[in-house]
Image: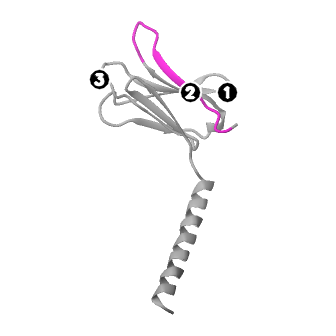
Amino acid sequence: MTQRTLLSTLGTASAAVALALSTAGAAHAVSYVSVEEGQDWGRISSGGDYLICDKEADSHQAYALLRWESGGATRLNDSNGSTAGCSGASTSRVSEISRFVVCEDIPAWPDSCRWKDITWGD
């Protein structure tokens, strides 16, 4: 086998492996929805993992809400406030979420919130 044939064969084999890996990854692709409220932000994945990040040192705690299609909500506070890191959780009920909400808790005033409706391709 010549060097050119060997390189061509290796190139074809590498391309086939790369295609197989990218196709396998596409079957298990995870989608994300992100919401920003000022500098605070949250993210939820189609796999059910979600987090909230308070990025403002303003003494107003950031929190995320999962609004359920059946009514009600689940709340997650950023437990460490604006210090480094975020707070996260997960749910097995991701298909039942209708809206992902990120808010800033403002005492004696309505909370400041932003949201996105969740469809995951419904």
* Quarter of the rendering occupied by the C terminus: top right
The stretch in magenta equals: 105-121
Q: Position of residue 108 (x, y in %)?
A: 41, 6
- Label located before the other in sequence (3 or 1): 3
Q: Residue at x 63, y 55 (%)?
A: 27
Which amino acid, mark 2? Lys
Question: How far apart, in angstroms, are the residues tagged by discs 2 and 1?
Answer: 14 Å
Q: Position of residue 105 (x, y in %)?
A: 42, 17
Helix, strand, or loop for circle 3?
Answer: loop
Q: Which residue is mark 1?
A: 69
Pick the front one: 10 or 32: 10
Which amino acid, mark 3? Ala
Depth-wise, is mark 2 or mark 1 nearer the camera?
A: 2
Q: Which residue is mark 3?
A: 57
Q: Which residue is mark 2?
A: 116
Residue at the farthest top position: 108
- Label located before the other in sequence (2 or 3): 3
The answer to whether 100 appears left or right of 83 in the picture is right
